[in-house]
Image: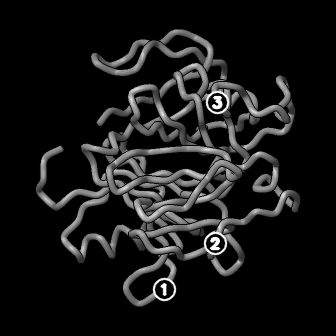
Amino acid sequence: MKFLICLLLAPIVFFSGSLPPRETDTNSILSYEVNPAGHDLRFFLKDQHQHSFQNIGKLKQSLDSAGLELVFAMNGGMFTTALLPQGLFVEGGKLVAKTDTLRSGYGNFYMQPNGIFYLTRAHQAVVCTTSKFVLTPDIQYATQSGPMLVIDGAIHPKFSEGSKNVNIRNGMGILPNGNMLFAISKEKINFYDFAMWFKKRGCRNALYLDGFVSKVYLPAEKIEQVDGTLGVIIGEVKKKGEKK
């Protein structure tokens, strides 16, 4: 597992064994890489009493009581006022919410094409457009969000370079080695620059997760944003005392 804090459009020093040097501008990005075959990544929505976790702090408390340690967490997609997923959600192989196939609607979710991030039982991570997604029994976790940031190596066609539409944003993409790259901007950023950040790292497909509500938990970097209101939460866990 590797983590790095990088700046967009200027070379930086990077840890031995990490990704190639980054380029950045004035915006900064916190990123975290997960190997789907070597680490336990899960999607969370409700606790054992069917109460929404709502934020990373409550999820952490629940995991603590189960003897698990939260290593990393990030909000995993948009949600309704009832804190339910806006679109597809699969948890532990169970279909919780169906795919939203509407082609238009209010908000970033409906900026077409939107997409789906899923994990299979064989520990393969995939990001694809919603139109290409097929729900199969081997899918362990899945979440739908939008818009796509990078589509088959190309930046989303509706993004404009130099756009003034800036916000805190988080998303994830699939690296050439099959690992998942999660990222959140530490400053406001437009869609084009955020998508370009993933593209420069070799992600042929990347998905936007959300904006100003976005939170991240990464104690290894002394970042613990445990408050807020969230729907789906994506988190890496390990048994307490287990070495990574």
* Front in this rendered view, residue 178 or 47: 178
- Residue 15 lies in what quarter of the image? top left
Classed neighbour count for the residue bearing mark 3: other residues with Cα under 10 Å, few (<14), some (14–19), many (≥20): some
User: Residue 133 placed where, x, y %?
Assistant: 61, 53
Residue assigned mark 2: 98
Q: CA distance from mark 3 to mark 2?
A: 24 Å
Residue at x 55% of width, y 57% of height: 76
* Front in this rendered view, residue 28 or 193: 193
Residue at x 33% of width, y 76% of height: 62
User: Residue 167 placed where, x, y %?
Assistant: 74, 43
Tag 3: amino acid:
Asp
Left or right of 121 in this view: 146:
right
User: Residue 152 got which mark?
Assistant: 3
User: Residue 35 got which mark?
Assistant: none
Q: CA distance from mark 1 to mark 2?
A: 20 Å
Tag 2: amino acid:
Lys
Residue at x 66% of width, y 66% of height: 99
Identify the secondary structure beneath mark 3.
Answer: loop
Residue assigned mark 1: 51
Coloration mode: one colour
Q: CA distance from mark 1 to mark 3?
A: 37 Å
**Is label 1 in contact with label 2 (beta carbons under 8 Å)?**
no
State which quarter of the image contains the N terminus: top left
User: Residue 47 placed where, x, y %?
Assistant: 41, 81
Question: Which mark is in front, 1 or 2?
Answer: 2
Classed neighbour count for the residue bearing mark 2: other residues with Cα under 10 Å, few (<14), some (14–19), many (≥20): some
First along the sequence among labels 1 and 3: 1
Left or right of 115 in this view: 231:
left
Residue at x 58% of width, y 28% of height: 204
Q: Is residue 62 above or below residue 72?
A: below
State which quarter of the image contains the C terminus: top left
